[in-house]
Image (tube, helix red, strand yellow):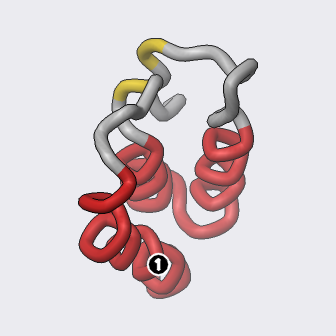
Amino acid sequence: MTPAALLLSLPVHAYRFLLSPWVGHGCRFHPTCSAYALEALSRHGALRGGWLALRRIGRCHPWGGAGIDNVPD
């Protein structure tokens, strides 16, 4: 993982450790948005992985859909 991608993954790790236990387990996507973000950052780097993660989080609303959504190759 590049240093920039590692830097962007720190807030995701903080969310998973601090906030996720309080938010609950009601994710409509598989993998969860945080797991998707970490995988996208590690596979595609900071720029494209960050963009993919932001797009995924943007789809997380009542009309955004659900189901299996894997990180693209």
**Could you say where residue 6 lies in the image, as x and y percent from the top left?**
42, 80
Q: Which residue is drawn at 39% across and 70% down?
A: 15
- The x and y percentages for residue 33 are 46, 44
Picture residue at 48% right of the left edge, 60% below the top: 41
Task: Judge from the rendering whether residue 52 lies leftward or rightward of residue 19; answer left or right.
Answer: right
The picture quadrant where one finds residue 46 is bottom right
Identify which amino acid the numbered label 1 is placed on: Pro
Q: In which quarter of the image is residue 29?
A: top left
Q: Closest to the observer: 42 or 69?
A: 69
Instruction: Give the quadrant of residue 70.
Output: top left
Which part of the image, by quadrant, shows the N terminus? bottom left
Left or right: where does residue 8 sit relative to residue 6? right
Q: Is residue 72 above or below residue 3?
A: above
Residue under circle 1?
A: 11
Rendered view: 11 above or below 71: below
Viewer-closest of 67 and 44: 67
Residue at the spot 38% in from the left edge and 33% down from the top edge: 26
- In the image, 55: left or right of 40? right
**Disc 1 crowd, CA 10 A, few/some/many (<14, 14-19, 20+):** few
Disc tally is: 1
Horizontal and vertical percent position of residue 3: 46, 86
Q: Which residue corresponds to the image point at 43% horizontal and 69% vertical from the top-left? A: 12
